[in-house]
Structures are given as C-alpha cells and as structure tokens.
Image: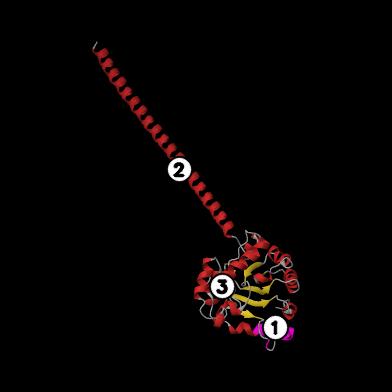
Amino acid sequence: MVFLALLLIVGGIYTTTRYFHDEQIKRHAVRISKQKSKIAESQRQASKERLRTAARVAKHREMEKVAAAKMGQNHIESANQYAYPVAQVKQEMDAPYTSPIKEKVVFLTFDDGPNTVNSPKVLDILSQAGVHGTFFVVGKQVSPETAPVLKAEYDAGHAIGLHSMTHDYSLLYPSRVGATAVIENEAKSAQAAVQQVLGSDFRSHIWRYPGGHFSWKGLAAADVALSRLGLDWIDWDAAVGDALSPAQEPKTEDAMLQYHLRSLNVYPASNVRVVLMHDALGKDLTVKTLPRI
C-alpha cells in the first residue's frame, strides 16, 4: 500500500509537472506567434511605407518633368547629352578650373541670324564635321522666309539663344548705358518671335547682349530683369574677328585663323572656349574659314 501510495504521489507530481511544462510551451508558442505577427505587421507597414515613398518620389519626378516642360528648353531632348548649363560655362570663364566642367570644351556660337544664305551653309558645315553650335537669334530676322532655317537649326540639335529683337545699339544702350526696360521688352519679343516658329514649348534661357556685356555701362538692372525672365547672359572668350569694322576685320582665311589663334591668348586659359562668330549676311569669310576653325 505504501509503495502504491508512493507511486501515486510520484505519478501525481510527474503529471502536474508535465501539465505546467506543457502550459509553458503553449504560452511560449503564443508569445512567438505574437512576435511573428508583430514582425510580419512591421514588415507589411515598412513595405507600405516604401511603396508610399516610391510613389512620392515618382510623383515628385513627374512634377519636375512637368515643370521642366513648362519651363521649356532651347534645344531638342537628345541634345541634353552634350549641352552644358550656361551658369557652369560662365563660372569656368570667370574663374578658370573652378567649375564642374573638367574636360576641354569648345562652344561655337553664331550671332545675328537666321538668314537663308549663310545660316544654311553654317548648318551644312557643322553637320559634316559632326559638331553642334549655338545660334543667337535676332528677333527681327525671324520671318516666314527664315522660319525653315531656324527650325532646321533647332531640329539638328543646335541650341537657340536670344540676341535681342532689333540689335539696335541706340535703343538698347542710349549714351552707352543699358536701357533696362528696352532690353527686357526686346528679350520678351525675341522669345515670342522664336516661339512662333518652334512652338510654345520652346524657351531659350540664354541671352547675348549685342556688342557684348563688357562693352556697355549700367547693365546690372538689365541683368536682373533678364534673370526674372529665366535668361542668363553670356559673352565669349575667343573670336575670329568678324565683328570688327571692315577696315580691321581679316581679309583672308589665313588671316582669320591667325586672329582666332591670337584671341586664345587674350583671355585666361580655362576648360572652356566660347567662340564668337557670325552667320549674318556678308559674313562669307567666316563661312569659308569655319571648317578650319
């Protein structure tokens, strides 16, 4: 009896101990299950947040694209691969070797077009050489006759800059001082004239003062006015001499090339060269010399 009782007592203790052990396992399993649920929920929330973030980023990028489209460009989309922001170019010109431009880059610029004589010839030469340029357009030169030339410049991947509406020094700079209101109005008019041909999505963001910024006084206010219009001005740091008076300008291809080479020493060395040339009527020597330049 005693032995039996002992067995019963021991058996009861064993049974109770196993019961509590099983309960602990169950509670532990419940805790693990809850933890797994929390982890899964946390992962789901993190995944949702990543999706929301991705959606916000996508929306922001889309808004940027829309803003850029509204702002417009002065070149076709494919030209982005070789286009440089004018601010970077100016920085490199003003403070050599300080800009993000680390490679040697030459910018061929042509003022006073478009026309149906020299502008198409310049386009052909650039096409044959496989290079691109920037055409600074005078608004009054844009007409039904020259519109196809302007469009050809744009469609070929060249940049279009603004070079005033009239190119009239007496209006733009009376007494050699910048007339802010006139300059602002001419910038607007020139932009509108080009948009009549290239469409409302086009918008140039680059301006060249007729005669160059350095030639005139009192342009600070005009610079601000242009900036409000989304325009940044730029001059040049190399030339071919075709802006000189008839008595001073080069008369042969060799003379023009020598003038160009000398001009490189006038300005400080840098990673960029912005070459001033003209595609206006009468600039035949520039067209002939261009392949050598």
Q: Which of 62 and 233 is in front in this view?
A: 233
Can the viewer see residue 223 in this picture?
yes
* Image colouring: secondary structure
Count of marks, rendered view: 3
The image shows residue 283 at horizontal and vertical percentages of 72, 79
Q: Who comes first in sequence, dot 1 or dot 2? A: 2
- Cα distance between the residues tagged 2 and 3: 55 Å
Q: Which residue is the site of mark 2?
A: 46
Q: Which of 128 and 143 is in front in this view?
A: 143
- Residue 259 sits in quarter: bottom right
Query: Quick check: marks 2 and 3 in contact, CB under 8 Å?
Result: no
Point 28% across, 20% down: residue:
13
Kind of residue indicated by mark 2: Ala
Point 42% across, 40% down: residue:
42
- Cα distance between the residues tagged 1 and 2: 65 Å
The image shows residue 82 at horizontal and vertical percentages of 63, 65
Query: Of circles 2 and 3, which is in front?
Result: 3
Can the viewer see residue 98 in this picture?
no
Q: Which residue is the site of mark 1?
A: 257
- Cα distance between the residues tagged 3 and 1: 33 Å
Looking at the rendered image, the quarter that the N terminus falls into is: top left
Query: Where does the magenta region start and end?
Result: 248-261
Q: Nearer the viewer, residue 234 or 272?
A: 234
Q: Nearer the viewer, residue 237 or 234?
A: 234
Taking 216 as reference, is 46 above or below it?
above
Point 64% across, 80% down: residue:
239
Secondary structure of residue under mark 3: helix
Q: Which residue is the site of mark 3?
A: 183
Query: Of circles 3 and 1, which is in front?
Result: 3
Kind of residue indicated by mark 3: Ile
